[in-house]
């Protein structure tokens, strides 16, 4: 059991979870966070105008509950990050409601930051669950599997995967006024990643994995919507997303 003595001298880690109409997934996610070998110091759930039981699930699961009436993952995620920072966390860990982190997830995140004082953020991979096996395979191979090979050369550093990453609070405070957190029509994690730089020391660890629902690939239209959202994110952040400009900045 993790005790107060264990916590002495360790960073404060708060988990940020944006949530809209995802009571069932949220219940599983909070249960997984409760059963960590190194529990988070606190969990913040930002309810995004849910019409289901998500708020009561958050409260019963021991989370700090906030409400963001502006619908969109980015507005909800930004509020969660701000709250985690306001409560004095050294590290902001992020999952989505359908993320299922393994028991050593927080412990591994903590160890990564303790081992490298210059580490700005660490991002991991997802393993899809739910839906037909072929859907999970396609998502794993051509969506998540393509993310790092494509985005790392483009950005000059790994992308922060919204279902599974953690960053120093100081990095969020540096970037928070540059992100487009009022936009509900773009990918929050991609927008945040575009604002990062190689000098922020962003690390991708393929062995840091969480379960992730395969629901984004339930229909071709759902997948198309995600890809269109990615294009809007790049367009909204241009010219900062321009890879040529980014390389010139780093020289």
Image (tube, grey):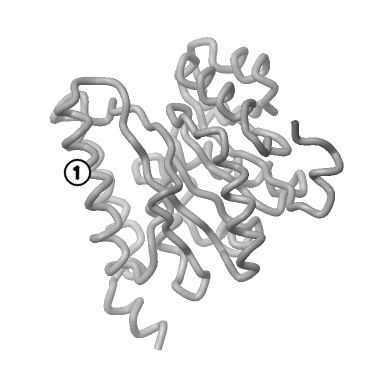
Question: What quarter of the picture does the C terminus occupy?
Answer: bottom left
Q: Quadrant of residue 64?
A: top right
Residue matched to label 1: 141
The answer to which image quadrant residue 159 occupies is bottom left
* Quarter the N terminus occupies: top right
Residue at the image position 64 percent from the left and 51 percent from the top: 110
Horizontal side of 90 relative to 22 (left or right) equals right
The residue positioned 19% from the left and 25% from the top of the image is: 133
Where residue 202 appears, as percent x and y from the top left, is 48, 64
**Residue 234 location, x and y as percent?**
29, 58
Q: Looking at the rendering, which quadrant does residue 194 occupy?
A: bottom left
95 vs 202: above or below: above
In the rendered structure, the answer to whether residue 182 lies left or right of residue 176 reads left
In this rendering, would 99 be left or right of 174?
Answer: left
- Is the residue 95 above or below the residue 245 in the image? above
User: Closest to the observer: 69 or 224?
Assistant: 224
Number of numbered discs on residues: 1
Residue at image position (62%, 32%) is 36
């Amino acid at each position: 059991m993790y005790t107060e003595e264990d916590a002495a001298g360790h960073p404060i880690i708060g988990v940020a979870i944006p949530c809209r109409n995802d009571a069932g997934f949220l219940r599983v996610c909070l249960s997984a966070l409760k059963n960590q070998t190194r529990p988070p110091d606190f969990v913040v759930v930002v309810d995004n105008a849910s019409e289901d039981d998500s708020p009561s699930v958050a409260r019963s699961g021991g989370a700090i509950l906030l409400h963001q009436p502006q619908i969109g993952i980015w507005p909800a995620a930004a509020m969660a990050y701000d709250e985690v920072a306001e409560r004095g966390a050294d590290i902001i860990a992020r999952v989505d409601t359908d993320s299922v982190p393994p028991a050593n997830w927080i412990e591994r995140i903590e160890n990564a930051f303790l081992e490298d004082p210059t580490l700005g953020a660490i991002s991991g991979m997802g393993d899809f669950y739910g839906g037909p096996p072929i859907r999970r395979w396609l998502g794993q191979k051509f969506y998540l599997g393509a993310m790092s090979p494509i985005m790392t050369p483009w950005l000059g550093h790994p992308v922060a995967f919204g279902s599974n990453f953690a960053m120093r609070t100081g990095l969020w405070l540096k970037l928070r006024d540059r992100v487009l957190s009022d936009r509900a029509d773009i990918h929050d994690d991609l927008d945040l990643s575009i604002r990062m730089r190689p000098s922020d020391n962003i690390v991708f660890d393929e062995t840091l994995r969480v379960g992730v629902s395969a629901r984004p690939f339930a229909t071709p239209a759902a997948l198309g919507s995600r890809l269109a959202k990615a294009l809007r994110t790049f367009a909204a952040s241009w010219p900062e997303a321009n890879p040529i400009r980014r390389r010139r900045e780093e020289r």
